[in-house]
Image: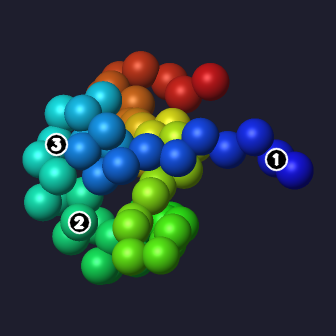
């Protein structure tokens, strides 16, 4: 079994410096992968890195590597 750390909405929002309401909107829009545990919503910790990588843009005038 794969070792997956699951975060609450509040825990997921914290490192991204966004409000939990923003994360809930992303979930409804299908932008974030979630795991339902009964009625609870949990987000894999790996999604934080994916969201950061997806939103990373090179500065103007700086070549990408």
Give coordinates of residue 57: x percent, y percent.
38, 37
Mark 2 or mark 1, which is nearer the start of the sequence?
Answer: 1
| Disc 1 element | loop
| Disc 3 element | loop
Classify mark 3: residues with Cα within 10 Å, few (<14), some (14-19) or many (20+): few
Q: Are marks 1 and 2 in contact (CB under 8 Å)?
A: no
Residue drawn at x 31%, y 39% as measured from the top left: 11
The residue pinned by badge 2 equals 24
Label 3 vs label 2: CA separation? 11 Å
In the rendered image of this protein, does residue 22 appear above or below residue 65?
below
Residue drawn at x 54%, y 28% as measured from the top left: 64
Give coordinates of residue 1: x percent, y percent.
87, 50
Mark 2 or mark 3, which is nearer the start of the sequence?
Answer: 3
Which sits in the foreground, 61 or 35?
A: 35
Using the image, tell me which numbered label, if any, was put on residue 2. Answer: 1
The residue pinned by badge 3 equals 18
Label 1 vs label 3: CA separation? 28 Å
- Give the number of the mark in front: 1 or 3: 1
Residue 18: name its quadrant.
Answer: top left
Give coordinates of residue 37: x percent, y percent.
51, 69
Classify mark 1: residues with Cα within 10 Å, few (<14), some (14-19) or many (20+): few
Mark 3 or mark 1, which is nearer the start of the sequence?
Answer: 1
In the rendered image of this protein, does residue 37 appear above or below residue 56?
below
């Amino acid at each position: 079994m794969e070792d997956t750390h699951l975060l609450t909405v509040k825990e997921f929002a914290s490192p991204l410096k966004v409000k939990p309401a923003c994360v809930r909107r992303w979930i409804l829009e299908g932008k974030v992968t979630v795991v339902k545990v009964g009625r609870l919503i949990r987000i894999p910790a790996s999604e934080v890195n994916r969201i950061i990588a997806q939103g990373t843009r090179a500065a103007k005038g700086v070549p990408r590597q």
